[in-house]
Amino acid sequence: MKISKYLFQISLLWLIVFQAQADHLRVNISGISNSLEQAVRNGLSINRQKDNERLTDVSIRALYVRSNSEIQEILRANGFYKPEITQSLENIGEVWIANYTINPGAPVIIRNVNVQIIPGAVDDVEITKAVSIFSLKSGDQLKHNLYETGKVSIQDFALQKGYFEGKWEQSRLEIITEENIADIFLTYSAGVRYRFGNVKLPVTIIAPDLVEKLIQIQSGDYYEAGTLVDIQQRLQNTNYFDQVVVQTGEVNTSEKTVPVNVEITAKKKHAYRAGLGFGTDTGPRLAGAWDVRYLNSRGHRLENDLRLSLVRSSLSSAYLMPFFRSQDSELGVTATVSREDTDTAISNKFESSVQHLRPRWGWNETLSVTYQYENFKVGNIEDSSHLLIPGISYWKSSSDNPLFPRRGYRLSADLKGSVNNVISNVHFLQLLVRGKYIHPVGDNGRFISRAEVGGTLTSNFLKLPSSLRFFAGGDNSVRGFDLNNLGPLNTDGEVIGGSYLATGSIEYEHRLSGKWSAAVFSDFGNAFDKFTEPLEYSVGSGIHWQTPVAVLRFDVAVGISRKDNPIRLHIILGPEL
């Protein structure tokens, strides 16, 4: 019975509390800008608590009483020191309404900003750059958060640069409310800049002198936190190491040094890859690769690649020798045998080249000299060519997702040629530029465009092998037409390729549900001997499905520039960039 009586009393008390609480509370604020109103609402307790189910009449009045001081504090933080606030609290039925009309008044403007950085040495100019970090300038409206974050930014900059003993000699904000002006006086004593101490490197698969070139710091260099991040990224980008940890040890305050410890775990020596693909042009595609990541302590490596399909097959091997410098560059010797058999041409080719690869101007640059021997048949011409081809190429790409990008691009440019001499039996100069761009449209759409433009200068086009001629048509060219089925014709009506190429595509894809999307597109272009010759056009639509490995596309295109309006199904499984 006592327990029942106790429970009854507790229930009655809760009933009384809930009867006394307000069912609704509104907070009205007027007279100030939207951004300032949002700041007031975020900091006003009565506004933050308005949806609290346990809010009673007594607590509402208490929140209302302290709201004036809260508003003034929020306004001061935003530079308004002389506001006029009119407020009222009323109860209409079961609804409490708190009204605030705010005239913020004139803001406080910064008159003088005096920021001084005292370096630890006369010739130490690095720390003086911290002055520019402080964002508030003379004539700006005072905002206390910018004042505080500016001070923190200066301290962070000093720590990143190795000034571990810095301190504020002066940190003063003077506000003259009668005149609505403020003066800022900051003096930061940086102290001595620390240096890197002992740099401890592990014994690894790469020779110590090469690792030292990669890390590019020595004991006695000025400390900089960003350098440690660069070291870790540079070591990881070599593709030799699975895990890289760059850590600092305990700071030596007597010697003013910071030791560095580098820990490295090597990747497995051998790597194997396999892949599948499909395209209407090529049929099923198989790909395999075997890489020897490191052959010796100098970091030399071997890459072998095999690609098989009914139309194009190739086997290549590359011996790569890195240059351990500030930029990742390497020298490579490659050999490739390939075969291509299409309705327009048959080619058997051997290539051997020496290449220098390096990043340059934000691009990937390849300088090469290639010897190429090719047996080919195009139309009714069957011949062979041997060429020594110097060339240069650039490419770059970016995407937000390597498999299914909603935003990304890929650009490339290739320039190459040969001179008719003892080694080469034809001279030519050729430029080919390609690009693809993907851009999101709303939450479910993508705009996809691509283009390629190329041109060849030669004194004897018929001596050019088929691999150096331009053709159009196919899955990744002008859909609606067969692979390499567009281009200049010989007297027998057979496509023999052209000296110039121009193709493009615009496409809109919209996600239907889950991993399924629908697309509409238009392709255009041709291969020709003169740019004045007409282009071919096609339109189409398709259904796309995101498989676990790539996008599978089912596209149907109609060639609208031909009287017979050819229709072709394109099934493509592969990467989009």
Image (cartoon, rainbow, N blue to C red):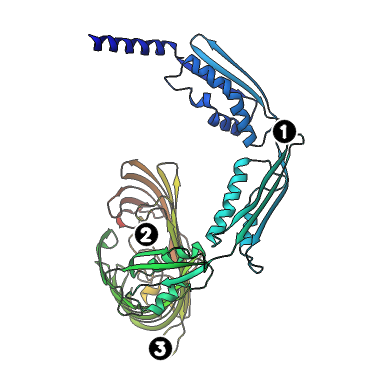
Would you say 357 lies left or right of 294 here?
right
Q: Residue at x 64, y 34 (%)?
A: 76
Q: Is residue 500 above or below residue 332?
A: above
Tag in front: 3 or 1: 1
The reply to whether discs 3 and 2 touch (Cβ–Cβ < 8 Å) is: no
Q: Nearer the viewer, residue 80 or 171?
A: 171
Q: Residue furthest bottom?
A: 422
Q: Secondary structure at mark 2?
A: loop
Instruction: Look at mark 2 in the image and give the residue it sits on.
Output: 476
**Image-based side of 275 in relation to 489, left or right:** left
> With respect to residue 69, does 218 lie above or below?
below
On screen, residue 177 versus residue 44, left or right, reads right
Distance from the alpha carbon under mark 3 to that under mark 1: 83 Å
Check disc 3 and give the amino acid type: Ile
Q: Nearer the viewer, residue 370 or 377?
A: 370
Mark 1 crowd level (few <14, some 14–19, many ≥20, 10 Å Cα): some
Is residue 404 in view? yes
Q: Which residue is mark 1?
A: 106
Q: To which residue does mark 3 refer?
A: 423
Total labels drawn: 3
**Residue 2 appears at what percent x and percent y?**
24, 10
Q: Earlier in the sequence, mark 3 or mark 2?
A: 3
**In front here: 293 or 49?**
49
* Residue 3 in picture, x, y percent from top left: 24, 12
Q: Earlier in the sequence, mark 1 or mark 2?
A: 1
The amino acid type, in three-letter code, at marker 2 is Asn
The residue lying at 61 percent from left, 44 percent from top is 146
Which is nearer the N-term, disc 3 or disc 1?
A: 1
What x and y, as percent, mark residue 514?
Answer: 31, 42
